[in-house]
Image: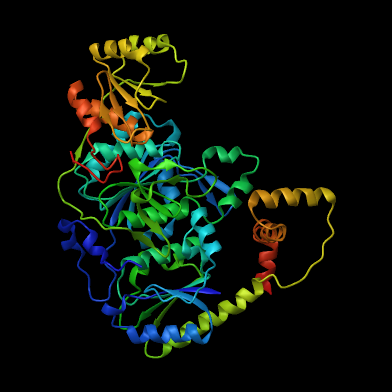
C-alpha cells in the first residue's frame, strides 16, 4: 500500500488551509468530475441509470456516497453520450479544466469507451504545463444495453466490475501525484495517448505497452512512479475548426479517390498506408498539389521504426492512430504555418511515440 | 476466508503493538490474510491471479473481509472504506479512543455507514475482543453461505442444453451459474422472503 502523505499531493497554496488537529483526518482533496458520456450505471443489478442532463449529474453522484470518503467531488455536465462527442466538445472540456484549475486538486472525466482514446490523446496535447492529474474513465456498459435482450447477462458478466469500481479508482488516482492525462479502466492506469483497445470482453477494455502502464490496482492504487505536481499556470490550446480527411490506402488504390479528397481542400489529409516505404509513387503528383494548396499531408505508417520527413509528406510512425489524429488537430490549431506544423508532428511532445522523450510545449 | 488487514506503516505508527495484537488474532483463527505492509499468508494460485489480472479485477476483490486500523490519517483509508462500501465487503474499522473522531468516516453521515461496516473505538485490550468477535461472526456467516447441502434436481434435456451453452458463455460451471442465479436473481429479489427473515 502506498504510504505517502496525501496532503503533500495537494497544491501548496491550498495546503495552508488544510492543517488538522493530531489524529484527525486531513481535509479531503477537491476533485472535479466531468460528465462526457460513460456514466451508465447498473443499480442493484436491476436497472440502468445514465446522465442525460446537468440536472441528472448530482442525482447520479448520490448513488456513490462512498466517494465522500476519498474526495470532495464536484460534478460538471458536458454532454450526455460520449459517442456523440465532437472535437468542439473537447474545447468545452479544456475550458472547464482551465476555469477550475486553481480550485481543484485533480480531474476525472467520465467518457464512453468509444471515444475515450481520442479524447485522452487530444487532452494530452492541449493541456500544456499540466501539473495535476487528469484521469479518464467510464462504464463498460452503454445506454443501449438498456434495450439489450440479455441485460442481466451483461450485468452478470461484469459482476462487481463496472463504472462504480472505475470511478472509485479514478478519483483516488486524481488525488495522487501524477501530472499527465491517463486512462483508468479495470485494473490498469495507462498513458492516455499510448492506449489502444484490447481484444476480447475483459473489463480491461484498453491496453498499452508496459512502459506506458503508469500504475495498477491491486490492494490500492500503485503508481509505478510518482511525479512532481507543479503550480505553473496551465495553457490550453483551443481547437480550431479544422477539416482533417482520412484516406486508407490499399493495393489497387485509385488516384482519383484521393483526387476527390484533395479537391475539397481540407486542412490536412492523413493517409493510412500499408507500405513500408511510404505511399505509391502514382500518388506523388496529388500529394504535391495538396501541399501547394496548403493542405498538410501526413502519412500514417505503423510499420516504420521512426518517423521521417519525405519530399511530399510527413511520415509518422510509432504512434497510435487516435493519438495521430488528435495531434494533427492540435498542431493545426497551434499554427497555420505548414512547416511548423510538420515539425510539431515529428517532435515527441507528450511521450506519444512511446520513446520516453518529451520536449514539452 | 481471506482477510485484508490495513495498518499505518510501522515506521511511523504509534500503534505497532495494536497491529501485532490484531495479527495474532488472525493467526489464531488460522485465516488467510494479506497485510498492507506486505505480510502474506494467502497462497493465491497463479492461475487465479492470472485470470484475475486478465479480467480487470483487483486483488481486493478476492478478499472476503477487511480489518482496518485507522487511528492515524492515511491517504488509503478513505479509498479502502469506499471500496468496502461499494463492494459490500464486511469491514471492521478500528481507532484508538484517544483519537477524538472517526477519521475519514466523519465525511459520511451516520446513516450512510452501512451495517456491514463496523466502527469501533478501542482502548487497551479491547481491540483483540472486537476483531475476534467480528471474525467469529463472519466465519459463521460464511459457513451459512457455503454450498454444503447436496441437492439432486432432475431437469429437461432442453434445460441441460441451455445450461451447457450459458455456462460456457459465462465461463462458469453449470452449478456455479445456477447457484448465482438463485442467489442474485431469486433470493435477493424476493422481498417477501426478506420480510420473513426479519421476523424470524
Residue found 49% across the figure and 44% down from its top = A40
Quarter the C terminus of chain A occupies:
top left
Residue found 42% across the figure and 36% down from its top = A115
Q: Quadrant of residue A311?
A: top left
Q: How is the image coloured?
A: rainbow
Q: Residue A85: horizontal and vertical position, in percent?
A: 40, 32
Task: Please say if B87 is above or below A335.
Answer: below
Quarter the N terminus of chain A occupies:
bottom left
Q: Residue A102: horizontal and vertical position, in percent?
A: 20, 48
Residue A62 appears in the figure: no
Q: Quadrant of residue A148?
A: top right
Q: Residue A76: horizontal and vertical position, in percent?
A: 34, 43
Judged left or right of residue A198, residue A86 is left
Task: Please say if A186 is above or below B23.
Answer: above
Task: Please say if B11 is above or below A142.
Answer: below
Residue found 55% across the figure and 62% down from its top = B47
Residue A20 appears in the figure: yes
Q: Residue A344: horizontal and vertical position, in percent?
A: 21, 31
Q: How many marks?
A: 0
Which residue sits furthest bottom? B125
Residue found 47% across the figure and 43% down from its top = A198
Judged left or right of residue A100, residue A257 is right
Q: Quadrant of residue B5?
A: bottom left
Judged left or right of residue A18, residue A148 is right
Q: Nearer the viewer, residue A26 or A118?
A: A118
Task: Please say if B124 is above or below A9.
Answer: below
Amino acid at each position: 500500500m502506498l504510504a505517502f502523505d496525501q496532503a503533500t499531493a495537494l497544491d501548496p497554496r491550498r495546503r495552508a488551509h488544510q492543517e488538522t488537529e493530531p489524529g484527525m483526518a486531513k481535509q479531503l482533496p477537491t476533485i472535479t468530475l466531468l460528465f462526457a458520456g460513460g456514466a451508465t450505471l447498473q443499480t442493484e443489478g436491476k436497472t440502468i441509470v445514465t446522465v442525460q442532463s446537468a440536472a441528472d449529474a448530482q442525482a447520479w453522484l448520490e448513488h456513490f456516497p462512498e466517494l465522500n470518503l476519498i474526495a470532495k467531488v464536484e460534478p460538471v455536465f458536458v454532454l450526455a453520450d460520449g459517442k456523440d462527442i465532437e472535437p468542439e466538445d473537447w474545447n468545452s472540456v479544456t475550458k472547464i479544466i482551465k476555469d477550475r484549475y486553481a480550485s481543484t486538486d485533480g480531474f476525472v472525466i467520465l467518457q464512453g469507451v468509444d471515444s475515450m482514446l481520442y479524447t485522452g490523446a487530444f487532452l494530452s496535447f492541449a493541456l500544456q504545463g499540466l501539473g495535476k492529474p487528469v484521469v479518464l474513465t467510464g462504464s463498460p456498459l452503454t445506454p443501449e444495453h438498456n434495450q439489450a435482450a440479455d441485460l442481466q447477462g451483461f450485468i452478470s458478466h461484469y459482476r462487481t466490475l463496472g463504472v462504480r469500481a472505475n470511478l472509485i479508482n479514478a478519483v483516488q488516482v486524481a488525488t495522487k501525484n501524477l501530472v499527465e492525462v491517463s486512462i483508468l479502466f479495470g485494473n490498469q492506469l495507462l498513458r492516455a495517448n499510448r492506449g489502444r483497445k484490447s481484444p476480447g470482453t475483459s473489463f480491461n477494455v484498453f491496453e498499452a505497452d508496459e512502459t506506458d502502464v503508469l500504475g495498477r490496482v491491486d490492494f490500492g492504487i500503485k503508481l509505478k512512479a510518482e511525479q512532481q505536481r507543479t503550480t505553473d499556470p496551465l495553457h490550453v490550446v483551443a481547437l480550431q475548426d479544422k477539416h482533417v480527411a482520412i484516406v486508407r490506402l490499399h493495393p489497387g488504390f485509385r488516384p482519383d479517390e484521393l483526387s476527390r479528397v484533395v479537391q475539397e481542400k481540407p486542412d490536412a489529409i492523413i493517409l493510412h498506408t500499408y507500405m513500408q516505404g511510404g505511399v505509391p509513387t502514382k500518388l506523388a503528383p496529388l500529394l504535391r498539389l495538396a501541399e501547394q494548396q496548403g493542405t498538410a499531408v501526413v502519412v500514417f505508417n505503423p510499420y516504420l521504426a521512426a518517423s521521417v520527413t519525405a519530399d511530399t509528406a510527413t511520415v509518422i510512425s510509432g504512434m497510435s492512430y487516435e493519438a495521430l489524429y488528435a495531434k494533427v488537430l492540435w498542431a493545426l490549431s497551434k499554427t497555420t504555418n505548414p512547416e511548423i506544423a510538420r515539425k510539431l508532428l515529428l517532435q515527441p511532445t507528450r511521450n506519444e511515440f512511446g520513446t520516453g522523450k518529451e520536449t514539452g510545449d | 476466508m481471506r482477510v485484508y488487514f490495513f495498518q499505518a506503516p510501522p515506521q511511523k505508527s504509534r500503534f505497532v503493538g495494536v497491529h501485532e495484537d490484531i495479527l495474532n488474532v488472525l493467526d489464531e483463527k488460522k485465516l488467510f490474510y494479506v497485510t498492507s505492509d506486505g505480510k502474506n499468508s494467502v497462497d493465491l494460485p497463479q492461475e487465479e491471479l492470472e485470470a484475475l489480472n486478465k479480467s480487470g479485477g483487483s486483488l481486493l476483490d478476492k478478499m472476503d473481509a477487511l480489518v482496518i486500523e485507522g487511528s492515524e490519517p492515511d491517504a488509503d483509508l478513505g479509498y479502502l472504506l469506499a471500496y468496502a462500501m461499494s463492494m459490500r465487503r464486511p469491514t471492521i474499522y478500528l481507532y484508538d479512543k484517544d483519537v477524538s473522531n472517526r477519521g475519514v468516516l466523519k465525511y459520511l453521515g451516520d446513516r450512510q455507514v452501512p451495517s456491514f461496516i463496523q466502527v469501533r473505538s478501542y482502548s487497551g485490550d479491547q481491540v483483540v475482543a472486537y476483531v475476534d468477535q467480528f471474525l467469529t461472526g463472519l466465519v459463521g456467516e460464511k459457513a451459512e453461505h457455503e454450498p454444503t447441502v447436496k441437492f439432486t434436481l432432475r431437469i429437461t434435456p432442453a434445460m441441460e442444453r441451455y445450461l451447457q451453452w450459458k455456462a460456457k458463455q459465462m465461463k462458469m460451471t453449470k452449478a456455479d451459474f445456477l447457484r448465482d442465479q438463485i442467489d442474485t436473481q431469486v433470493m435477493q429479489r424476493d422481498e417477501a422472503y426478506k420480510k420473513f427473515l426479519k421476523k424470524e
